[in-house]
Amino acid sequence: MGTDRTGTFALGNYDGISIEGASKFNIVGGYAPEEGNLVSGNIAYGIPVFGAGADENIIAGNLIGTDYSGTQAIPNTYGVLFDDGAKYNIVGGSQPGATNIISGNSGYGVFLYNLGTKGNIIKGNLIGTDFSGTSAVPNANGIVVDGAAFAHVIDSNTISGNLQQGIAIHITGSDSTIITRNFIGTDITGTLSLPNGNDGIRIAEGPKFTQIGGSLQLGNIIAHNLGNGITIGTDNDDYNRISANSIHHNTGLGIELFPPGPTINDAGDYDTGPNQGMNYPVIDSTVCSGDNVTIYGSIDTQNPQNITIELFESDNDGSGYGEGLTFLGSTTPSDIGLWSYTLFSVAQLYLCATATDEAGNTSEFSQYIYINPLSINENDKNVQINIYPNPFYEIINIDVRLIKTSNLDIKIYNSLGGEIYSMSSDYSKGMQNLHIHLPGINAGIYFMSLSINDRIYEHFKLVKILHNTE
């Protein structure tokens, strides 16, 4: 439909196959090889589905924008369109043979457009690649959601080799897109580079509540793209959750909250911007015991106890921030923003993190640090620390055994994270007995951070009481 009978050059129609009005339950193509259509070379759309009531149609097993072999472009302007209220249609699917090749189109591979267009599923397709999923046959953009199209699912596709964005989501009201288990910027195996020409995913001009990944099972691979892995571009783009993905080796940042470049944290996280300008977590220090590593960090934001910190092995990005190659796990900070996480059986790695607030705003990747347990002196695990009494009245005693002359740094914070005491001094090898006087402070909860040679060994919760029990 749109080519000569050999499927090698265009004789275009205006549209290829048009499903209009209240047309329901149609199947375009099928799951056996002989059932698929070649829909290429058409002036406007390959397969447009539009109108309120154009629901629950299936598009499966077709070549849309290529020649008969699936290796060369015979462009439609757009490959597949859902518009004007079309709902709950499926492009591709989970069944063997459902994959569509949607490549070579001069505009968008898949276009989801307009208010009322809702709940369509794009699953298991090759969008921007050839039939094998290993070479590019580019669309201009892979998938575009625009015009307040709502609540679509983009799952288990290879979206690579496109000239601009892999996925672009635009305009206020284009909300609640779910993006899971896709390869964006790689070949069909998820391992080899097949970049999109700009960002892997771009969100701009107002979309909210996008979910990108969500768990180890739902994470996307977003890699090797020639822009950023994910860009969130404007002040109204909020509540876009990015969780448990593998984002690595993109030319730009792994996650970019505009303006361009790493966005520096602000005190108290009171700024606005894309994803509310969410601060990234800070990795303060690590403590190694054998090949186990405990990471200590902090997050400066409102209600930190409601934040989720996700940790990743980093790809050692040249910017010094991220990217998050491998999802390692998550943790929740205390109400003053202190957090920790232990990794077991660790070889050397670079480590970075993100923060996501309870509304779903995810930060950029943090600065990464290098961890090599094998470089840590094995005697360090024998450091002994004893703090008493707890609860305390005015005096806190600290006994610490040092294995060598070391710098000892102690800080105490109130429950709001404000620093009320700090000391730093060099001490000789052996047992040290320290006494901290804190007269006049209010009864309540306090936290102590104790570091030896710039590595935090312990975070302690202290309780101040009103009467002397010492």
Image: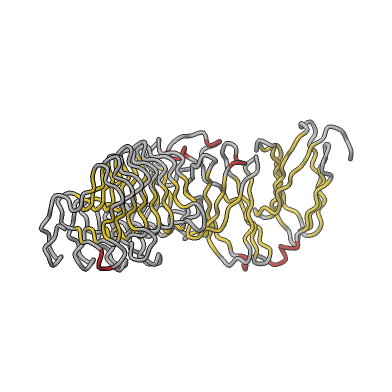
Residue at the spot 12% in from the left edge and 55% down from the top edge: 12
Q: Residue 113 at what x, y percent from top left?
A: 29, 42
- 357, 24: nearer the viewer: 24
Residue at the spot 76% in from the left edge and 31% down from the top edge: 442
Q: Residue 162 at what x, y percent from top left?
A: 28, 56
With 397 as the anchor, is 376 left or right in this view?
left
Residue 395 vertical placement versus 196 (above, below): above
Residue 58 vertical placement versus 208 (above, below): below
Residue 457 vertical placement versus 264 (above, below): below
Q: Residue 446 at what x, y percent from top left?
A: 73, 39
Residue at the spot 66% in from the left edge and 58% down from the top edge: 287
User: Total label count?
Assistant: 0
On the image, which quarter does residue 204 sit in? top left
Which quarter of the figure is the C terminus placed in?
Answer: top right
Residue 435 vertical placement versus 91 (above, below): above
Q: Residue 153 at what x, y percent from top left?
A: 39, 50
On the image, which quarter does residue 76 sit in? bottom left
Task: Determine the residue located farthest toward the right in the rendered image.
Answer: 469
Please say which color scheme the image uses.
Answer: secondary structure
Which quarter of the figure is the N terminus placed in?
Answer: bottom left
- 457, 461: nearer the viewer: 461
With 363 as the anchor, is 397 left or right in this view?
right
Residue at the spot 40% in from the left edge and 35% down from the top edge: 236
- 440, 363: nearer the viewer: 363
